[in-house]
Amino acid sequence: MLPGSLGAQQAKLTAQNARHFAPPQTPVVLSRTIWRSLPDGKNIMVRRSYEVRIAALDDGYLVNGALLDTVVEAPPPVAMLAELERKRPDAGPFPLRLDRHGIITEVAESPADGAARADATRGSALILKKAAQSGDAQDKALAVLTRVLSSTSGSAAWPIDLFNPAQNNRHEVRRVPLPGGASGEVDVSINVQRPGPGPLPELFERTVITRLDGSERTSREVWTIGSR
């Protein structure tokens, strides 16, 4: 199920998306490309493509998907993790449920997600051991590498209005309280390209910039939808 914190977002987006939703009758290819920054400023890129079918069900829709292809690009120091990611089976968030407005109301929890996090942890530890890092530096780097790879799992944080975006462009900055009275911020930008209201978008891009305690981390995700 979707996290409880998304309940208010779902209600708001459902109201905004009262316009017609017209999913295709034939299969489409949905690709999700993720860029995650590493501690040295370099990036890991993971792209997974799925064949997706949307069928009417009750007062909404059921979306089924099957993995077609996985592409991973990563710098040589994390080649081991990249290979693990390339070989990992991934069912994505499918099957998932949409309401009649095209808003995601329920996603499948893949048992492979836990295995992916375990593999990422083991691979990260081996990489850092090979690099002869130790102490606090190793602990921090391990946490970052593990988070980077586990965050690429198929059911992680898909936008609930992916199939029928409420707006073509959105920007929001959220304050994050930190210990000692300090604060950081999360800057979220959404860009959508679509042929018009109702049909599936051709592109949905989300960029998140996290600024905490003097550091800045950027993650970027792009979903594209095209004919099979």
Image (cartoon, rainbow, N blue to C red):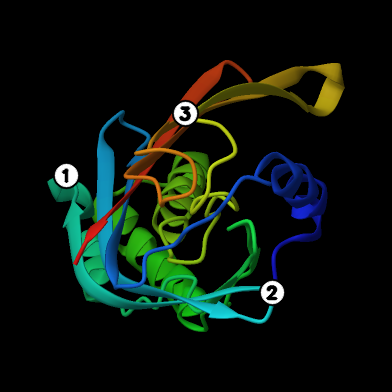
Q: In this view, does 72 lie above or below 15?
A: below
Q: Which of marks 2 and 1 is nearer the N terminus?
A: 2
Helix, strand or loop status at disc 3: strand
Q: In this view, does 90 lie above or below 205?
A: below
Distance Cα–Cα, label 3 vs label 2:
40 Å
> Is residue 88 in view?
no
Mark 2: amino acid: Asp
Q: Earlier in the sequence, mark 3 or mark 2?
A: 2
Residue density around tag 2, few if under 14, some if 14–19, many if 20 or more, within 10 Å:
few
Provide the residue designation for mark 1. 75
Work out which residue is located at the far right of the displayed protein and give it: 181
Q: Quadrant of the C terminus?
A: bottom left
Distance Cα–Cα, label 3 vs label 1:
18 Å
Residue under the image location 50 percent in, 66 percent down: 155
Mark 3: amino acid: Arg
**Which numbered marker is on residue 59?**
2
Q: Toward which corner of the image does residue 85 lie, by quadrant?
A: bottom left
Say which of 170 and 37 sits in front.
170
Residue under the image location 39 percent in, 65 percent down: 120
Mark 1: amino acid: Pro
The percent position of residue 162, horizontal first and vertical second, equals 50, 50
Left/right of residue 18 with respect to residue 84 in the rendered view: right
Say which of 104 and 37 sits in front.
104
Residue density around tag 3, few if under 14, some if 14–19, many if 20 or more, within 10 Å:
some
Helix, strand or loop status at disc 2: loop
